[in-house]
Amino acid sequence: MAIQDFVVLRKGKEDSIKRYHPWVFSGAIFSKSFEDNSSRWVKVLDAKNQVLGTGYFSDSSIAVRLINFSDETPDAVFWKNKFESALNFRKSIGFYPAENSTSFRLINGEGDGIPGLIVDVYADTVVLQFHHAFLFENKELIINGLTAIQTFSDSRIVVRNTFDKHSETELYRGKDKESVVIKENGIQFLVDPFGGQKTGFFLDQRENRSLLETYPRGKRVLNTFCYTGGFSMYALRGGAEKVVSVDISAYAMEQVDKNLKINGFSSNNHESVCADVIPYMHEAGPDFDIIVLDPPAFAKSLSKRHNAIQAYKRLNVSALKVIKKGGLIFTFSCSQVVNREMFERTVYSAAIEAGRNVRVLHRLTQSPCHPTSIFHNEGEYLKGLVLYID
């Protein structure tokens, strides 16, 4: 069925779309063919009524998210082709199939040409996270496209959304709501797709966890905001003398202990601490050779960015003041509105305030299974630095 509704852009506002940027902001719209602001499929037209693309409309600052740059109708075949293309990309970079890993991101929003949709694969479970109401309303069509691919034809399907705070995670297909055990580079993790954060696990840190594993032999490691202990497990396998995992969530700390057990790691050289991170670092003092700072997003909107930058600065100052001489800090920001330049400038300011000499060893980003489009810089949300502290 052809798309009937459309929006017309103001003259000159089509330039970003011609450069393949997938967002149309509300201020760029001159007129629309419909009166209410309910979500729907729309064509995007320039001032000369030429079709620039199709996407889904919503009453928000990002008014249209483009799914293609033509007037193609997103039918069942369209969705199947999208998922096949995404899977073939993961195959080409070695993420599927992989002998030592059974988890990866299949759809990374704009990076895979489907703004507002995240799809993560955890062994035999696929979790779809909808960030746009209209996609959620069309979930059956979308999931049918996914399960039409043989790889996912028998998968358990879990559906989550972020736009409705009252919505519960849905077991769309499958018999149970049990957690699933995955492998990542040979390490096992228990993933809860129903009660865990995001889709259940943070797959974006995969390569960064592997990098950490190369450093900790014989050292003491502090993993802050540890969630279910991803960095902690890699540090233990890397030969750390002692690992302390800290998170304010009691649920997270329970999951850390479960992950220790399924991997056969001893609790003799690991400590789980349910506490607020900054006070804990101050109390612990200069006891660590490596500190991991991987906080949740401190800002999810531009209005919160200044406060977020101050929070990143306080956190990094605290770590810099207690890290041992010759120590390493793995520091991250996953706030999309804080770009890499802002983040690095904040860490620079923290180093000045802490009075420590700091060298940058690595600049880090999200896993390759979380690709970004070169036309959509906003997709690079994860920024990280590995710092050597004199």
Image (cartoon, helix red, strand yellow):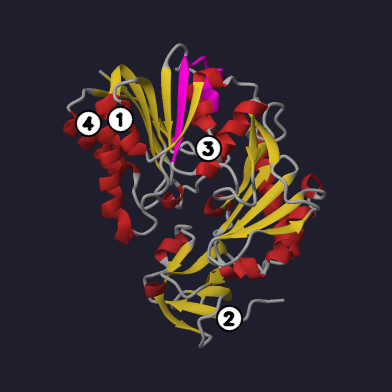
Q: Mark number for residue 206?
A: none
Q: Which residue is mark 2?
A: 5
Name the kind of residue labelled 1 in the image: Glu
Tell me the distance, in whole angstroms, between the alpha carbons under discs 1 and 4: 20 Å
Image spot of residue 75 (x, y percent):
72, 67
Separation of disc 2 and disc 4 at Cα?
53 Å
The residue labelled by disc 4 is: 351
Check whether the beta carbons of the residues at disc 3 and disc 1 lie within 8 A of each other: no
Q: Which mark is residue 253?
A: 3
Lower position in the chain sequence, tag 4 or tag 3:
3
Q: Residue 100: x percent and y percent?
A: 68, 26
Tell me where the magenta segment starts and ends, as one range: 233-247
Residue occupying the point 56% across, 76% down:
39
Residue at the spot of label 1: 283
Decide: few, some or many residues near mark 1? Use Cα within 10 Å; few <14, some 14-19, many ≥20. few
Q: Residue 384 in the image: x percent, y percent?
A: 39, 35
Q: Secondary structure at mark 2?
A: loop
Q: Quadrant of residue 137?
A: bottom right
From mark 4 to mark 3, how far is it between C-alphas? Answer: 30 Å
| Residue 252, above or below 235 | below
Q: Quadrant of the C terminus?
A: top left
